[in-house]
Image (spheres, rainbow, N blue to C red):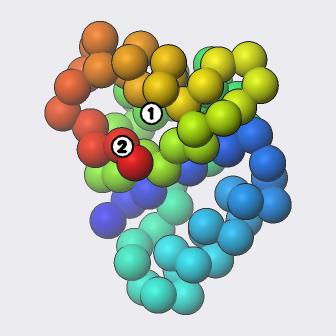
Amino acid sequence: MRYYIVDDNIGTVKSLENIIKSKKLGSVCGYSTSPEIAIGEILEDRPDIVLVDFLMGDMDGVDMIEKICETDDDLMMM
């Protein structure tokens, strides 16, 4: 599985990345601390699973998911 992580806290991103690697759940193909940047990267790279923080600064996780689903509703996001 290929994961993409979106969280405005880089410490959380690194913790999730370590869990994914240590549990051999797959690989992290990318991450962003900015929902706006993440949207473009996710739509371009098409990871298997996107892990999204609910509360972020400029745009919350729900808004980000809605924007992605307007373009591609096949991506799995948590």
Residue 19 image position (x, y, % from top left) = 57, 78
User: Can residue 53 be seen here?
Assistant: yes
Quadrant of residue 38 within the rendered picture: top right
Quadrant of residue 43 within the rendered picture: top left
Q: Kindly state the secondary structure of the residue where label 1 is placed.
A: helix
Identify the mark at residue 25; answer none if there is no mark: none
State the residue in front, 66 or 30: 66
Q: CA distance from mark 1 to mark 2?
A: 11 Å
Q: Earlier in the sequence, mark 1 or mark 2?
A: 1
33 lies above or below 23 = above
**Identity, as a three-letter code, of the amino acid under mark 2:** Met
Identify the mark at residue 42; answer none if there is no mark: 1
Q: How many marks?
A: 2
39 lies above or below 18 = above
Q: Is residue 25 left or right of residue 17?
A: left
Q: Is residue 14 left or right of residue 67?
A: right
**Identity, as a three-letter code, of the amino acid under mark 1:** Ile
Quadrant of residue 15 within the rendered picture: bottom right
Residue 77 image position (x, y, % from top left) = 36, 43
Per the image, the residue denoted by label 2 is 77
Q: How crowded is the residue under tag 2: few (<14 C-alpha within 10 Å), some, or many (20+)?
A: some
At x 40%, y 48%, the residue is: 78
Quadrant where the image shows the N terminus = bottom left
Residue 20 image position (x, y, % from top left) = 51, 75
At x 39%, y 78%, the residue is: 25
Q: Kindly state the secondary structure of the residue where label 2 is placed.
A: strand
